[in-house]
Structure formats: C-alpha cells, structure tokens
Amino acid sequence: MRKIKTLGLICFLAAILVGFGGFVKPKLVKTKVNDKITVLIPEGWLAMEGMDFIQRYPSVRAPIAAYTNEERNIDFSINISATQWLEGDLELPKSFFKSSLLNTFDKVEIISEGIQTVSKKKLIFFEFDSRMEGAKRNEGQQEAIMRYTYIQYLIEKDRTLVFSFNCPSRYKEEWQGTARQMMKSIKFK
C-alpha cells in the first residue's frame, strides 16, 4: 500500500513538471557589469568571450558585457549604440529604434513598447517576437529563425546604451518573466 502511495506521489509530481514544461525559474544573482552598472543575471550564466559574441552578433563594437546560459541559446548583452541622441525628448529616438527593428527582421510582432523608469532613469523599451526567413539557396540556413527579444535603450550624453535579452521563440513562455525581471533590475550609479 505504501509503495502505491509513493508511486502515486511520484506520478503526480512528474505530471506537474510536464505540465510546466519541466522549467524551473532560475535564481537571479546580482552581477557587477562595471563600476556604474549592476544587473540580476541567472545563476550559472557565463560571460561570453569576445569571439563568441562576434560570431553570434556581428557588430562593429564589442559589447560592454554579454552573458549566455550553459546551452548558449539564451543571451543578455549590454552594448553602446552607434547612434547618439540628445537627452530629453525620447519619442523621436523611440520611433527611430522601432523603425530600425521593423526593418531588421522579416516579421516583427510587438508585445509591448514604451518608456519606463528603471533605477530613476527613463529607458525606451520594446518586447517583441521576430522572424527571419531562411535563405533557400544556402544549405544550413533554410529554416526561419524565430526569436523573442526584450530590448531597452538608455540615452545619455554622448552615448546610447542598449540592453538586450533574446532567446529562441520556443523558450519565450519559460523566459519572458525572467527577461522582464532582469531588465527592471538594472541599477545605475
């Protein structure tokens, strides 16, 4: 009788894990990016090496910091944008950034957008799903790439900081809450 109850409990717990996709919300740890920025990052995430970031995110500028999970498919980075804006009116740069995002991908579905206060600073943000069609002629690039992204822009004098979280769309449900929490945890000195 005891074995049946134990087996029943195990089956019940297994059903709960399957129902939640087996995903356990990660523990976030305070991470010092540099002398002026801290953010909560999932425990166990790794700092990306320079070449790793460049191969995955070609850019003319190296990031301030970039982190990835152990499987290297979910990322968070902080970069400096090549565009500079005057501090103050955020609506013009917001429309510019939105237009740029819409033109970067084949399809973009905006989940939320706006201007929010994080650590007493106003940041422009976009949360969206994107799709890049595969190149039918290039073997290995034939499948569409679908991603979930949460991106924020902090406009400061002489620079724009870009905070970006992204993962494959199939992980969106599991990571969306964590992405939002990470973005709101950013602290500036």
Image: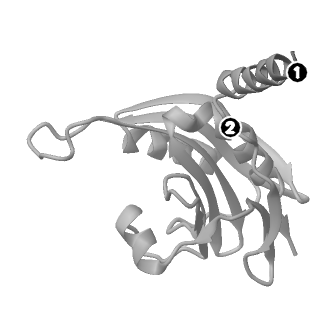
Q: Nearer the viewer, mark 2 or mark 1?
A: 1
* Image quadrant containing the N terminus: top right
Q: Name the residue under label 2.
A: 23
Label 1 sits on what residue type? Arg
Q: Residue at x 65, y 25 (%)?
A: 18
Residue 186 visible, this angle: no
Figure check: 88 above or below 104: below
Query: Is 100 placed above or below 14 here?
Result: below
Classify 52 as above or below 6.
below
What separation in Å lies between label 2 and label 1 (alpha carbons)? 29 Å
**Residue 2's disc number:** 1
Residue extending furthest toward the bottom: 35
| Position of residue 32 in the picture relative to residue 136 (left or right) | right
Q: Is 31 positioned to the left or the right of 109 in the image?
A: right
Q: Which residue lies furthest to the front in this view?
A: 1
Q: What's the residue type where badge 2 is placed?
A: Phe
Query: Which type of secondary structure does the marked residue at label 1 adopt?
Result: helix
Residue 127: x, y in percent? 63, 38
Where, by quadrant of the figure, is residue 32 drawn? bottom right
- Residue located at (75% from left, 23% from top): 16
Sequence-first disc among 2 and 1: 1
Find residue 74 and name its label. Answer: none
The residue shown at (58%, 59%) is 69
For numbered disc 2, what is the local secondary structure? Answer: loop
- Viewer-nearest residue: 171 or 17: 17
Looking at this view, is 48 or 65 the one in front? 48
